[in-house]
Image (tube, coloured by chain):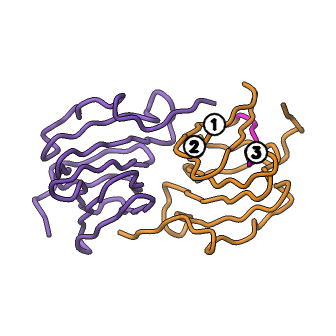
Chain colours: A orange, B purple
Amino acid sequence: MDAFRPDRSLARPAAHPEYFEGRVFMQALVDAERSPDLEILAVFFEDGARTTPHTHATDQVLYVLSGTCVVADDSGRRQAGPGDYVRLPAGGWHWHGAAPGQSMCHVSIRRPGATDWTVERRDW
Amino acid sequence: MDAFRPDRSLARPAAHPEYFEGRVFMQALVDAERSPDLEILAVFFEDGARTTPHTHATDQVLYVLSGTCVVADDSGRRQAGPGDYVRLPAGGWHWHGAAPGQSMCHVSIRRPGATDWTVERRDW
């Protein structure tokens, strides 16, 4: 077994900043080197940062660790706080990030699969 | 999207109490009806309860929400506390539960797959 925990000091700037608006830092807790079954990332959004709209080939579950998380998809926009889980079905466009002016950290949990960042711009 | 959070009042007694020692309650956060990709369960162990040794066909990640979690596998026994993640590789025997006399809640995160509870008794 191995053990780990989200730690802002271990996070690195997002490898593709063009997929985000604002400053975003990522820490891979479980990646392809560690598991063929799960991808678990801690994502730190600073000062209202958020992702651009995108879709995943597999279901994604977000777990909010700190701050207020804003999530938008075809059903609208909602907020989630520390301890909340949000499930986003495969194939559905969505974006997520911190509430304006705030910082937020969530853990992204997925079965590994492709992400499409070329979805037509959609918002609420 | 849908949202949810671990809640002891929504947990039900384990469907197979023979796989546990002590009182264990489970709440399915994401199950087969909600996702083909992920199984996410909140598991509440009371008064030192623990699983019996078992293996999974897919990697499992435990996330400790409250209490002290004890995890054992071929590498030995270790403790994890709130905020810690522990990864258990597919195919490796392990057991997990609360420290003696305590209660503990962890979230189990897996890609769906079989569990084998017939492993030869092993402990540390």
Q: Taking B54 as reference, is A69 left or right?
A: right
Name the residue rendered at 43%, 61% in the picture: B85
Name the residue rendered at 24%, 54% in the picture: B97
Name the residue rendered at 59%, 59% in the picture: A41
Camera-nearest residue between B73 and A115: B73
Name the residue rendered at 28%, 70% in the picture: B78
Of pointers 1 and 2, the one earlier in the residue sequence: 2
Task: Give the labeled residue for mark 3.
Answer: A99
Q: Amino acid at mark 3?
A: Ala
Q: Taking B1 as reference, is B19 left or right?
A: left
Q: Nearer the viewer, mark 3 or mark 1?
A: 3
Please rate how many residues cluster around mark 2, counting C-alpha atoms within 10 Å: few if below 14, some from 14 to 19, many from 20.
Answer: many
Residue B99 point in image, percent of width and height: 21, 59
Q: Quadrant of the C terminus of chain A?
A: top right
Q: Are marks 2 and 3 on the same chain?
A: yes
Chain ID, mark 3: A
Q: Is residue B124 above or below residue A42?
A: below
Task: Give the labeled residue for mark 2.
Answer: A61
Of pointers 3 and 1, the one earlier in the residue sequence: 1
Please rate how many residues cluster around mark 1, counting C-alpha atoms within 10 Å: few if below 14, some from 14 to 19, many from 20.
Answer: many
Do labels 1 and 2 touch, CB within 8 Å?
A: yes
Q: Secondary structure under badge 3?
A: loop
Q: Secondary structure under badge 1?
A: strand
Q: Are marks 3 and 1 on the same chain?
A: yes
Is residue A3 part of the magenta span, yes or no?
Answer: no
Residue range corresponding to the magenta coloring: A92-99
Q: Amino acid at mark 2?
A: Val
Task: Give the labeled residue for mark 1.
Answer: A88
Of pointers 2 and 3, the one earlier in the residue sequence: 2
